[in-house]
Amino acid sequence: MSSLADDDTSATGPVGPADAPPSGRGTGPGDGTAPHDAGPGLSAQEVAARVRAGQTNRTTRSTSRSLTAILRSNVFTLFNLILAVAVTLVLLTGRWPDAVFGFVVVINAAIGIVTEYRAKRTLDRLSILTAPSARVVRDGAEQQVALDDVVQGDVLLVGTGDQVPADAQVLEVTGLEVDESMLTGESRPVHKAVGDEVLSGSTVVAGAAVCRVVRVGEEGYAQRITSEAKKFSVVRSELREGVNKILKVVSFGIVPISLLLFWSQLNYTGGVRASIADGTWRDGVVAAVAGVVGMIPEGLVLLTSLNFAIAATLLARQKVLVQELPAVEILARVDVLCLDKTGTLTDGHVALTALRPLAPVEGAREALAALAADPDGNATSRALAEGLADTPPAAVTRSVPFSSARKWSAVLTGAGAFVLGAPEILLAGRTDGPATTALAEVGEAAGTGARVVLLAHAPRGLPTAEAPLPPDLAPALLAVLGERVRPDAAQTLEYFRRQGTRAKVISGDNPATVAAIATSVGLHGEGVRVEGFDARELPTDPDELAVVVAAHDVYGRVTPEQKRAIVHALQSRGHVVGMTGDGVNDALALKDADLGIAMGNGAPATKAVARVVLVDGRFATLPGVLGQGRRVMANMERVASLFLAKTTYAAILAVSVVLLVWPYPFLPRHMTLAGSLTIGIPAFFLALPPNDRRYLAGFLRRVLSFAVPAGVVIGAVILAVYGYLRPLVGTDDARSAATLVLVGVSLWIVGIQARPLNGWKVALVAALAACAGLAVAIPWVRDFFALQVPTAQEAVVITVGVLVGWVAIEAVYRLLTPRLAGRPAPVRSAADILTSR
């Protein structure tokens, strides 16, 4: 981009006093009377007719998930139904201690309902339009009306600072410049002329205009994006998908197995009639429920939700808002991170990056400060004013106000006359030495994506607004302006490069500007030049687009729809895509990405649809989010084996007792005790420690490769001990012994999953073993859990069974260790990398 004025889509121009009050509240638009050229506007009768026809700015769309739907999806699930039936049957038997497992259903459903309801409320509040009211001309006078009351055909008045409430066509204009960055990604204000359209959701940054509303409500540009963004979608979580696959498999067998188990228990007690006659059917019901509860890894679902919630709480302390809990997992799996330039790599503000003197002209710096001192100036003037804060502005005798048509302004000071404007305008057609030197400097600065304005001395005095510029303007100063790059952008990108995550910069701005900033932050490494791709040349065919997207990492002039298409193209090639952004133009892409990340200072619509919001807007926070995602993935993989081993041995026991017509080895309360000591409590603690192990695909395969053989070992040992003792000591004592064997052998699995062991992990395993001993030693606890103090003979059998189980499980683990060695080694933490620089 060679200068301020080289791009006809963003002819911002230099700054100076406006031709008319830029707020639009002096003469013309905004002074309380209708401009005579605009006509009287709509009459009250015409407004009423449009309201009756539904041509208002009111919208009625909401999210696609009602509260009823959220409740239904979280409460009325297959497994909640199975567990609810199981709880009801146990309560009908009068043995309420065996129904304790029912609390898991309530807690898990509550977590899901609260999480989704929070997301629904956020989406329902979603709105791009934040202006409180609009100014329209009706019946020949200016009126303030609510946004919803704007109708099609209204004459709309806008001035500096106003947000456009509805799509409109410009009828009259006075130096109008509109910021559409939140909608299109174009970081520069866009000059609007008569006949141009202004889009709803954009903001006027300079000048004023009279417009006629052409689209309202859901037909407006902003509302169309909002409507797309409001559509409900659920985060794709590999953890949850893996658990759901297991649950689906279990669901096919759980009903027939439970019915067979119930039938076998009744047969064991003498048949259906005898069981009903003497009340022993209750034993059959409780035993069947114990088998059903054992096969359902309901605690894994609960722990997954709790782990996500804990991660979200920890991230909140780092000023990261997680709007959907499973999102903390996704960044650990992201292999392509799409970045919006404005608001992500840059902070969205223009800054004076350099002031290059071209010739020694007295008073030039002070004159530039005077030109920048306009309190109602645009982003360029504010950047100049901030950069020249230490320079006192010269006293201005006379001035020529800035005009977007002229693209220059001028002042007369005690040191002479000075003109500020686009270099190509001020030096048009000149080939002399000073002009050539100045234009060469302009080209060099523009090659970095900077914006350039030229201050020239006018030796003939102050030029007039109507006459052409004098041909002897003497170049004095070049002001180089650029977006402020976030100080944390370069080191954060370096971190992602080390992690093998490919970054792509996607922006609505000029490709050269985007490429220059991507180069400056070291997108491909320090000092490596990056080339930009003009999105206007992107193919529309999805397959062809995927090929192009694979080859390029920097894009400019990207529309919101193209951003979304780029995300889809990456996903079609099997990539897990993260997308950051702050503007409304990013909302659709953020929503469809596997993980949408919004900056805290972004548009409300963008923050509403994002899965994660960086509240303080710090790009450097992302490595910390990655760390939490890795902790969740790695630790949940560690503890999932505990739950799935239980599912395996419970299924083996259920089938075995059906075939052998034995009473089930456990009561539900036995399963509750064993599950708490060997799964629930240790899983909670083992899921908490930091874990920077890189994510590797195949979570479910790795978990099952150890959990299934371990579950087979536990099931075999329990059947052996229970089968040996039951004829000798009776069913109650044999069940108690089987429970102790189950706890003892399962604690070895806990120890394996806790490796490498340290002090607190050893203490945890020892405490769990002590709790099992206390459950037998304390009389009221022993009675509650229906346990027996083992005799010497039973103690020997229990000890042998536990030792055999330990040896067998250790052997299984060691045989599987080479297969599991594909897990990547831990890497340095994000904090270590970022603080070591």
Image: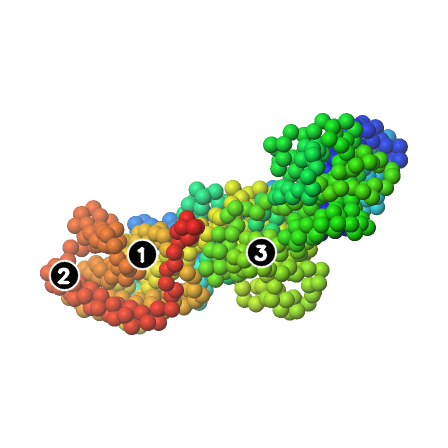
Q: Residues within 10 Å of mark 1 (few under 14, many from 20)?
A: many
Q: Residue at x 18, y 66 (%)?
A: 803
Residue marked by disc 3:
519
Quadrant in the rendering for residue 631: bottom left
Q: Secondary structure at mark 3?
A: helix
**First in residue order: circle 2 vs circle 3:** 3
Front of the two marks 2 and 3: 3
Q: Is residue 792 left or right of residue 447?
A: left
Front residue (pair 238, 158): 158
Q: Give the amino acid type for the residue marked by disc 2 in the picture.
A: Ala
Residue marked by disc 1:
679
Q: Measuring from the top left, give residue 457's x and y in whole percent.
A: 75, 38
Q: Is residue 402 left or right of residue 324?
A: right
Front residue (pair 51, 457): 457
C-alpha gap between disc 3 and disc 1: 50 Å
Q: Visible in this render: residue 5?
A: no
Front residue (pair 266, 530): 530
Against 261, is 379 above or below? above
Front residue (pair 319, 779): 319
Q: Measuring from the top left, give residue 493's x and y in whole percent.
A: 51, 55
Q: Which mark is residue 240?
A: none
Q: Residue at x 62, y 61 (%)?
A: 531
C-alpha gap between disc 2 and disc 1: 24 Å
Q: Secondary structure at mark 2?
A: helix
Q: Give the amino acid type for the residue marked by disc 1 in the picture.
A: Ile
Q: Which mark is residue 795?
A: 2
**First in residue order: circle 3 vs circle 1:** 3
Against 320, is 374 above or below? above
Front of the two marks 2 and 1: 1
Q: Residue at x 38, y 69 (%)?
A: 822
